[in-house]
Amino acid sequence: MEVEEFFELLVKEVEQTPGLQKYYRFVGKDARARFRKVYYCQRLQYILDHAGSGDQRIWDCGCGYGTTGIFLSLNGVASQGSTLEFYYKEIPARLEYWKKFGDVSKASFSYENMFDTHPPENSKDIILIQDTLHHLEPLQDALAIFKKVLSPEGKLLIVEENGNNIIQNFKLYLRRGNKRIIEIWDEQLKKNILLGNENIRGLSLWKSELKKGGFEVIDSETEYIRVLPPPFFGMGAESSIISWEQKAVKFSLLKEYFYFGLSFIAKPNGK
């Protein structure tokens, strides 16, 4: 299933599912809705492009509502998703919706804290970490688990916000100040867990942290997306806007401090 088709079906699901509407704010045809759509679809395409063939063993760490796992299954790619908190209860109904459009049996999900329970050693070829790496604390402990779980030729497939984005940094500072790590109570696990409080980082800082954990970022696979604000998405074709943004990424200061989305691949060293 192509990304565009999947997105249109996702919008229909969100329209009829109140539990998804606060997170997936895609409903509507105005410039802001198109702005969100383009960003979401570009990220999903990046994941599909790097997920490999159907025989890859994928751990979707921090899978949230399970959307990416469902999309991958519809494309014949199996994944094992783990998540926490309120997301999990929505997944069974979601599978009922999506099985009308294809095979969702390749997507499995569990409610787990990765520091308590995680896949066995050398059992995964890809670990997908989508909007989750900035939540994992202690980060180096998480990276040690990832390195243990990955096969020797495995990789981390990371989709994040650009932590150097000036506007997003300002918004997050107003929301949480410098309190970048917090502790929350998990009702199902009946315990406190440590959580990165939207603790986003720029690529250079991620490289430094990953290097400490025994990983190397593959520069040629790094992608920055979304720099134009919502009003531009009411003024022209989506393809033209994407094309302009892909060309403008060559300006290093613009890329580093104003592009919002950051996706990259990291591979283990010396395993």
Image: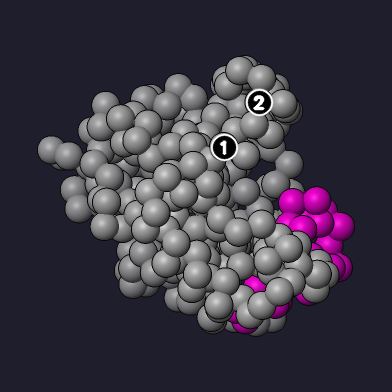
* Label 2, label 1: how far apart the Cα atoms are: 11 Å
Among numbered discs 2 and 1, the one appearing first in the sequence: 1
* Label 2 crowd bin: few (<14), some (14–19), many (20+), radius 10 Å: some
Residue drawn at (54%, 40%), measured in percent from left and top?
Answer: 165
Residue drawn at (60%, 59%), measured in percent from left and top?
Answer: 228
Percent x, y for residue 32?
75, 62
Residue 113 in view of the camera: no
Using the image, tell me which numbered label, if any, was put on residue 124: none
Q: Which of 8 and 259 is in front in this view?
A: 259
Q: In which quarter of the image is the C terminus?
A: top left
**Viewer-side label of 2, 1:** 1
Residue 215 in view of the camera: yes
Picture colour scheme: one colour
Residue drawn at (74%, 51%), measured in percent from left and top?
Answer: 23
Percent x, y for residue 85?
69, 37
Percent x, y for residue 232?
68, 66
Prevalent SS, magenta region: helix
Give the residue type that dot 2 points to: Tyr
Give the residue type that dot 1 points to: Ile
- Classify mark 1: helix, strand or loop: helix
Percent x, y for residue 50?
36, 64
Extreme residue toward the left, this view: 270
* Label 1 crowd bin: few (<14), some (14–19), many (20+), radius 10 Å: some
Q: Using residue 112 as the reference point, say whether residue 97 is left or right of it.
A: right
Residue marked by disc 1: 166
- Classify mark 2: helix, strand or loop: helix
In magenta, the rendered stretch is: 4-25
Q: Using residue 262 as the reference point, say whether residue 204 is left or right of it.
A: left
CB contact under 8 Å: marks 2 and 1: no
Residue marked by disc 2: 173
Residue drawn at (80%, 73%), measured in percent from left and top?
Answer: 29
Residue 203 sits in which quadrant? top left
